[in-house]
Image (tube, coloured by chain):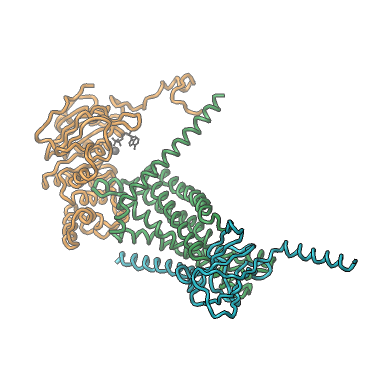
Amino acid sequence: MPDVKPAQTHPDALIEIKDVHFAYDERPILRGLSLNVRKGEVLAVMGGSGSGKTTLLGLIGGRILPNKGKIMVDGQNVPKLDRSALYALRTRFGMLFQFGALFTDLSVYDNVAFPYREQTNLPESVIRDLVLLKLQAVGLRGAAGLMPSQLSGGMARRVALARAVALDPMLMLYDEPFTGLDPISTGIVGRLIRRLNDAFGLTSLVVTHDLDASLKIADRVIVLAEGKVYRDLTPEDVRTTSDAFVRQFADGLPDGPVPFHYPAPPLVDQLLGKSSAGEIAP
Amino acid sequence: MSSVIEMIEGLGRSVLSALARLGLAGRFFLAIMMVIGVPLRRFSLLVRELYFSGVRSILIIVVSGMFVGMVLAIQGYEVLQRFGSSETLGVLVALSLVRELGPVVTALLFAGRAGSAVTAEIGLMQATDQIAAMDMMAVNPIARIISPRFLASVVSMPLLACMFSAAGVFGAYLVGVKLIGIDDGSFWSQMQAGVDFRLDIVNGLIKSLVFGVAVGLIAVFEGYYAPPTAEGVSSATTRTVVTSSLAVLMLDFVLTVWMFRGLNG
Amino acid sequence: MKKSKFDLAVGLFVAAGLLALVFLAMKVGNLTGLETSEGYRLEARFDNIGGLKVRAPVKSSGVAVGRVDSITLDSQTYEAKAILRIDQNYKFSKDTIASILTSGLLGEQYVSLEAGGDSVYLGQGDRIAKTQPAMIMEKLISQFLFNKASETTGTSK
Ligand SMILES: Nc1ncnc2c1ncn2[C@@H]1O[C@H](COP(=O)(O)OP(=O)(O)O)[C@@H](O)[C@H]1O
Ligand SMILES: [Mg+2]
């Protein structure tokens, strides 16, 4: 597989990741990943399930530490930060988790108010106005009194989005924001991501395997494979490229460079009992 | 031959992993103690957990205490009257409750009623990324979620144990005095003569404090490190009850030996 | 609104728990008038304390007036030395007799104080001169048998 050139230091890069290696126990997930994220862009990170997309977000957020490599965010090397410096940095992040991760024991209103109450000393009356404004921005001011269990998947995602942007972050991290949403909700969330990014001058990293949705909103698309950035493309390129791997992804083909089969000994051998690999009790 | 070696290897591995888990729990305990001031400063966090752990356990504790006291009275009377000393029933029941049954049975019931709920709640928060989300919002989940629940267990346990013992004494009074007809005055005066505040009641309180620490730690630990699946959370919940019960009974033995050694020497 | 519901319920919970503790302390236990710091200590030496235990009551005419604080063996005289803590409301004369008695047939043993007629009272740290040791069943029986034996030898003479 052709490698992408190692990322060059960019003066306008908000995130610079250099040669990051990461393994769970013995199993390598990222193997020398390098990536720059420019200020102000919406970058879509594509890759199959288990390709390490969530892991990448965890590394950027400092929730997990790399075995090797540098992760610079706004000039700070995240793995080297102590707890208070890391927390200071995180107050400038907004993260949308895969299924929203709303606090189930708090109402919609209290969920969005949570960052203000924890991180600021604003009086409750000011917080109230801010919360209602944020909820208005995602179109759910009317749902302020509901509990998370009363929300649909798309609504929960939007509330979580309102909560994530509460403290006007510089960087937004989205983990699979479209998973499990109907086409209308997907469109709404996608447009919100783009609009928030432009309106507040954010930088957004959208991890997804939904190509269509991300092509509509992204400035740039990278494809993760084998623990590295395998392709770095514009949405235009994705539509027109003849690269087999990207085509498989773009066209949703079951087999291609990404194999349909998990590695296994030949079927005939196993059925005839010749193979000892991958023992399955008869 | 090789199967024996395999067995020994397996045993060694499980001992090592149990020790590693114990070490992890110890580190977790230290992490909680570092931020134990948070629920004290932000009292509403503690109050909420006291409600769910403590208030919601009152009914089961008081009812169980009553019944245990009534049974103790019947069984105790049956034995004591053989020796013609049935008026000492009060002492027997009160000492059994205050020293042993109050703290121990309360801790076992608490582990089943509140500890398992705490594990399930935290495990589910972990599985649905709520804890990760909080951490990413630069709010320490150990301080905000774990330590109030732990502290609530430590505070609730002695209070509940007192209620259990008091309800038990009352139950024994109903059966012993009202039903069987032991003399009212000697029931209470024998009890007062035989139960010492510092040696019996305070020691019982110390026991239930220790149990509160143990059950609280096990409950939050199992929840925090539960695998983020339905199966993982449910088996963590079971483990909380089993491990807590074993821990309480073993600690009770150790504490009893330590507290009452030499008392009857 | 929800918060105040928690507050009230938890407040009641804590109050009920403390009330239960007070009940245990006052009604079940002995945390009443005569306790710890109050009172004065007397020393009494016995040849044998029998089954007397620390914390056993000290009574006078059946009324509890104190507790046994500690029991030790004097390694010079091989006497048992009991320290009694007496409620300061009660005074006992210099010639008081301390004896170890048993409540009921199999009940617990206690120290009984019988006041005499002396006008000087015992104070903190004083020693009760006259004591009577515990009745030991084996000794009573052997004494009884010895008496019987000497009676029979007496009549046969
Ligand atoms: N806590 C963990 N322990 C061990 N393996 C993990 C853990 N979390 C994720 N993995 C594994 O790491 C790989 C990458 O995971 P992830 O980054 O979540 O993939 P993606 O988000 O791209 O689907 C997966 O194969 C997953 O099974
Ligand atoms: Mg993922």
Number of numbered discs overlaid on the protein picture = 0
x and y, in percent, of residue C69 in the image: 53, 65
Quadrant (top left, top right, bottom left, bottom right) of the C terminus of chain C? bottom right
Where residue B125 sits in the image (x, y, percent)?
Answer: 34, 49
Colour of chain A in the image: orange
Residue B37 x, y percent position in the rendering:
30, 55
Res. B81 visible in picture: yes
Q: Colour of chain C?
A: cyan
Q: Nearer the viewer, residue B135 or A157?
A: B135
Q: Residue at the spot x=41%, y=46% of the render?
A: B222
Q: Residue at x 42, y 62 (%)?
A: B56
Query: What is the drawing colour of chain B?
Result: green
- As drawn, which residue projects farthest toward the left? A11
Outermost residue to the right: C156
Q: Is residue C86 left or right of residue B229?
A: right
Report whether residue B67 is seen.
Answer: no
Residue A6 location in percent, x, y? 17, 26
Looking at the picture, tell me which residue is in the foreground, A169 or A140: A169
The picture quadrant where one finds residue B22 is top left
Tell me which corner region of the image, top left, top right, bottom left or bottom right, holds residue A40: top left
The vertical placement of B175 against A31, above or below, is below
Seen in the picture, residue C17 relative to A21 is either above or below; the reply is: below
Taking depth in this image into account, of B54 and B197 the one nearest to the observer is: B197
Image quadrant of ligand 2 equals top left
Q: Answer left or right for A67 relative to B236.
A: left
